[in-house]
Amino acid sequence: MIELFTADTPNGIKIPIALEELGAPYVVRMMKLGSPELRSPEFAQVNPNGKIPAIRDHSSDGGPPITAFESGAILLHLAETFGGLLGATPQARAQTLSWLFLQVAGLGPALGNAGHFRGLRAPDPYATKRFQGEAARLLGLLEQRLRDSAWLNGESYSVADIAHFGWVRRMGYGGFALSDFPALSAWVDRIEARPATSRAIRRLSQGGDAPLPAPTNASAVTPSGAT
């Protein structure tokens, strides 16, 4: 069982989509961005950096739960643990990792910062131009890749596609229109049409399963039997 701590954000949607695709059992603990809960001692045992998404993996046989944070690390952990979404050949796996890391180190920060600086009460023109320029370059790179291949690793749907999906579908935050990128738009439609994506989006929209448990002692941080 995977205990998922997340929110309905471009990063937060990645993990439930992967879990649904992999058929892994999980419970959702919805976390409110900016809340004291994210800085609580209880959550620090899952993610000392105090951000979503994060997981506590109770699937190991008889061993202690495994914690993981940062969306790219979680996606890799889940793909390796449950088997899938990495590509069947060495070339496809290498491409999966390459495009995955491009998202977490490139497109996510670029779009996030573009949206932040353009949304300020007194927008910063230099910062906005810088981050929008980098986001535009990366979106163009993705557009070209998806003209040549249905999926980013060149073989099959993978964690690389899942990682980019949440940010691409909300590129309006950074000042871009999906309609300006026909290959990306068609790719978003393909992912949205996948049953696992629909289930994941619905799961988050329902508000999760339970809040973060508050342990009474150090040993209680591991729920019995139980983003």
Image (tube, grey):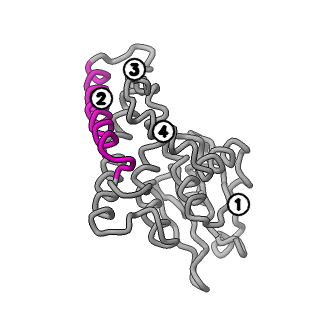
Q: Relative to the observer, which residue lies in front, 164 or 44?
A: 164
Q: Earlier in the sequence, mark 1 or mark 4?
A: 4
Where disc 3 sits, the SS reads helix
Which stretch is magenta? 126-152
Where disc 2 sits, the SS reads helix
Q: Residue at x 46, y 50 (%)?
A: 162
What amino acid type is highlighted by mark number 1? Answer: Pro
Q: Residues within 10 Å of mark 4 (few under 14, many from 20)?
A: some
Q: Is residue 34 left or right of residue 111?
A: right
Depth check, mark 1 against mark 2: the one in front is 2
Residue assigned mark 2: 136
Q: Quadrant of residue 193?
A: top right
> What is the distance, in whole Å, between disc 3 and disc 4 at their CAs?
24 Å
Q: Residues within 10 Å of mark 2 (few under 14, many from 20)?
A: some
Residue at the extreme bottom: 62
Residue assigned mark 4: 188
Q: Residue at x 70, y 65 (%)?
A: 215
